[in-house]
Amino acid sequence: MLPELNSLQLYLVTIVLVLSLLFWIYSNNRSLPPGPWGVPIFGFAPFLGKKPHITMSKLTQKYGGVIRFNFMGKHVVALTTYKAINEALVKQSDVFSIRPHSEFPQMKEYRGVISNSGEMWADFRRFTLSTLRDFGFGKTSLEPQIRDEIYHFITEVKALQGKPAVVGQLLQKSVTNVICAIMTGHRYDYSNEVFNKLLVLTGNLIKRSGIGRIERLLPKVFIESRFAQWFGFKSILETRLQKNELLSQVVERYDQRHRMGSTENFIDAWLTMSKKENSKYFTKKHLIGVLSDLFIAGSDTTSNTLQWGLLYMAQYPEIQQNVQREIDEVIGKEKDPTMLDQKQMPYTEATLMEISRIATIVPLSLPHSTSKSTTLLGYHIPKGTTIFPNLWAVHHDPDIFPDPEAFQPERFLVDEKQLKRMNEFLPFSTGRRQCLGESLARMELFLYFTCILQQFSVKNPDGMELDFDYNSAVVSQPRLQNLCLIPRL
């Protein structure tokens, strides 16, 4: 039995325990990254603003490149310098490569490649990359398919006869059709009901998925209740379920006529894999999750980059003319552009890089999480910490990209003839979670951009000022606005 303590001894023991606890708290907090104070319950969330990536970037001067803040009761760390991002995602990729737990348990069975972690993620990523390569990812064999879709887009634009139009919507449909053809084996007509509904649902999800959205400040119970509709909030969960149901109908149609061993498209290849031994994760629901990921990765990022590109070409006609001059000299006006032309067109490539830099389509990348406690640039990062790599902050760091708000393709050139490669240029993120669709996106960006400027000059409608503000979410989407694509003589 323990000896009884008198009041003085009990008092001294209590003091020692309290001091030890305070020392432990102080020591641990001292080793955590610095960051701004917030308010009770909400933390720093109300101060992130409509463009959280810019808010986080501004905090770098005071707190450095590893910034901790409280977000709705959870500690979140933002990485706002290239050094911090490279140290975490590349040098400690085994620790920083998992995803945070989904906010919706109902979606667990539908996890694809983007939101997954561990063995399942590794299996899905390996299968997806291998299968996509079989269908031409990163290979010239995919070019005819992309050019065919570009032909449909060009035909639609020619019908406009240079009149003002929101060509961004046409671009999205066209680019999305490329990945759809790989997933299902055929393209969709631009007026197809299922195709358009998928685009709308995907757009709604992206708009509601940013860290700075007001929904993030409200209890999940409220957001997913019927009362949320009274305040104009669209249920994220409901939208995801609607999209999954639509993709489920597509999968079922293919499953009914699927032949074992058939690999005519991505769905076919998955269904064949699902019937093999040691393929416990390859369920139809996880297939729906992977298709949903591919739909986003293969459409929104590329189409938004191209939309930004057209805006900047209209804003800077002298740069547009330089690109067109290089297109005319290397390709001509009659021959279709090919990826073989790319190496001979450094100015065009530099322009595409500058579009990707200044726009930074996915400014906060996608959230990562730590699989175990670790140390990052001298700071203690606990296990399970949500990490936001701020790619926008790197792309707008004046020490790396002087005068970052200026549109200057020359920053990616050496002597105007040679492309300048920069490690700090991270449009597809870096490390193990680097964008799955990077090779397709690079191919599409070059072919679409050169084909459009080969045949059209982009201008803003007379008397109209272009709007370079954007809707900030996971993807930075330019405002839909009219542009004139004038056929070149």
Image (spheres, grey):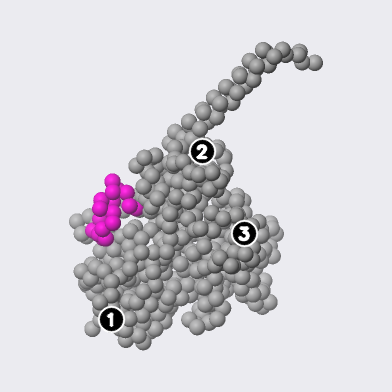
**Frontmost residue, 158 versus 441:** 158
The answer to whether residue 217 of the structure is visible from this angle is yes
Residue nearest the observer in this picture, 449 or 386: 386
Residue at screen point 49% across, 35% down: 32
Residue 114 or residue 342, whichever sits in front: 114
Disc 1/disc 3 C-alpha distance (Å): 49 Å
Mark 2 vs mark 1, CA separation in Å:
54 Å
Q: Is residue 330 above or below residue 276?
A: below
In this rendering, position of residue 31 left or right of residue 310: right
User: Mark 2: which secondary structure?
Assistant: strand
- Identify the element where label 1 is drawn: strand
Q: Compared with residue 18, is residue 337 higher up or lower down, i.e. above or below?
A: below
Sequence-wise first label, 2 or 1? 2
Image quadrant of residue 270?
bottom right
CB-based contact (under 8 Å), mark 2 and mark 1: no
Q: Which residue is mark 3?
A: 222
The kind of residue tagged 3 is: Phe
**Quadrant of the rendering where the N terminus is positioned:** top right
Task: Name the residue carrying label 1.
Answer: 486
Task: Examine the structure image and report whether residue 198 is included in the region drawn in magenta.
Answer: no
Q: Is residue 411 magenta?
A: yes
Quadrant occupied by the C terminus:
bottom left
Residue 384 marker: none
Q: Main secondary structure of the magenta part?
A: loop
Query: Which mark, by number, is residue 381?
Result: 2
Q: Position of residue 398 (x, y in %)?
A: 28, 48
Residue 152 location (% of width, % of height)? 41, 81
